[in-house]
Image (spheres, grey):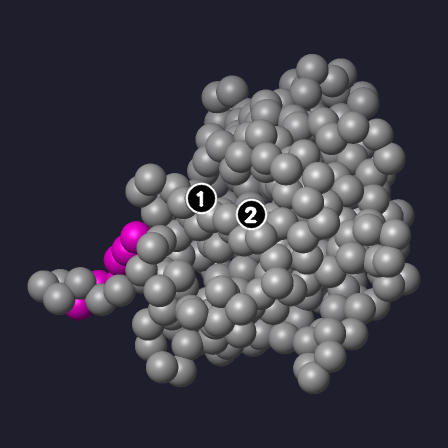
Amino acid sequence: MSSKTSILLIYTGGTIGMMQDAATGHLKPFNFESLTEQIPELKKFNIKLSSVSFEHPIDSSNMHPRIWVKLAEMIEKNYAKYDGFVILHGSDTMAFTASALSFMLENLAKPVILTGSQLPIGIIRTDGKENLITAIEIASAKYKNGKSLVPEVAVYFEYELHRGNRTLKYNSKHFDAFKSPNYPRLAEAGVDIKYNFNEIQKPGKGKLIVHKKLDNDIAVLKLFPGISKKITESILNTKGIKAVLLETFGAGNACTDEWFTELLAKTIKRGVIILNITQCLEGRVIQGMYETSSHLKKIGVISGADMTYEAAITKLMFLLGQNFSSQKIKSLLQKNLRGELSE
Ligand code: ASP
């Protein structure tokens, strides 16, 4: 085996590689070769850098679980050959992809770093160059014994490295677009890259297992004061749903109207899993802390603790995709599988 560190760059699309369409003025993805031409610095790395591109790069708003499977398969196919992976991805749904991949790639022992940009790489003030160059540097960073420094799925954006399944896009116009409000940064890039070693996941011990079955029969019920029975009923009674993500107030609270509790209880009796996460970006669900959440606990709503919306959705897709009993799914939802929640 060559001693040179090898990194596979996977280009999926996103602003980083977009150009303005002369006719419409819209930003559209363009081909990957043009992207590498824009960053001659890439040739200066003392690593073996290979790249593969989606045949049709996408704006990440068109991301789909079937594309996550494709990405996971690309990593699986190249896992033995490379020391790390950098995924160039649109920022809009990057946190979903990072969360999904974290669940799909069990026993991961190599870095999978997602990055992108707010301005296309061809624009002088682009944030894409720094993001890409540092993401590659992080993906290639190793201990003296050859083990990766960041053996997990992470998002690198504007000098910060975050755990993928703790990340959310919180700003659509600043370069500093991502946060992981409930988990410390994994690293910060300045003159040096400062790693937060205590917070980085340990590498997986067994062989990499790639989970490719995801089930998206999930509904989301985001509460607001005055939500009607009619709307709540129609969401909960959606044909074929297996889980409902309930977005509640504060520490996991909801109204205590009898109709509301009864509707939820009936849905759970039908075998649908209801997972409670908070609408607050920071903090956690503590069912039973207030009277306005103890009714949820009583009827069997599952607490999503401090999971992000992105992590909760993709964890549900992942667990529903396995052939697990409802009991097992409920129990795993409350367990920390990939660093996505604090138990
Ligand atoms: N709409 C773009 C995307 O997510 C935005 C970006 O890349 O930042 O693909």
- Looking at the rendered structure, the secondary structure element under dot 1 is strand
Instruction: Please indicate whether residue 148 sits to the left or right of residue 221 in the image.
Output: right
- Looking at the rendered structure, the secondary structure element under dot 2 is strand
**Residue 177 visible (yes or no):** no
Q: Position of residue 61 (x, y in %)?
A: 40, 50
Q: Position of residue 263 (x, y in %)?
A: 63, 32
Q: Amino acid at mark 1?
A: Val
Q: Which residue is drawn at the image coordinates 47% and 48% (left, top)?
A: 51
Q: Which residue is mark 2?
A: 8
Confirm if mark 2 falls within 8 A of ligand 1. no
Q: Which residue is drawn at the image coordinates 68% and 62% (left, top)?
A: 138
First in sequence: mark 2 or mark 1? 2
Instruction: Please indicate whether residue 126 sits to the left or right of residue 81 in the image.
Output: left
Q: Nearer the viewer, residue 249 or 168?
A: 168
Q: Which residue is drawn at the image coordinates 47% and 54% (left, top)?
A: 89
Q: Which residue is drawn at the image coordinates 46% and 35% (left, top)?
A: 67
Q: Amino acid at mark 2?
A: Leu
Q: Is residue 215 above or below residue 204?
A: above
Judge whether residue 26 is colored magenta: yes
| Residue sticking out furthest to the front | 2
Residues at marks 2 and 1 touching, judged by CB atoms closer than 8 Å: yes
Please state the extent of the stretch shown in magenta in the rendering.
Answer: 25-31
**Residue 130 visible (yes or no):** yes
Q: Is residue 311 above or below residue 325?
A: below
Q: Which residue is mark 1?
A: 52
The quadrant the N terminus occupies is top right
Structural crowding at the residue carrying mark 2, measured as other residues with C-alpha within 10 Å and reported as few (<14), some (14–19) or many (≥20): many
- Quadrant of res 284: bottom right
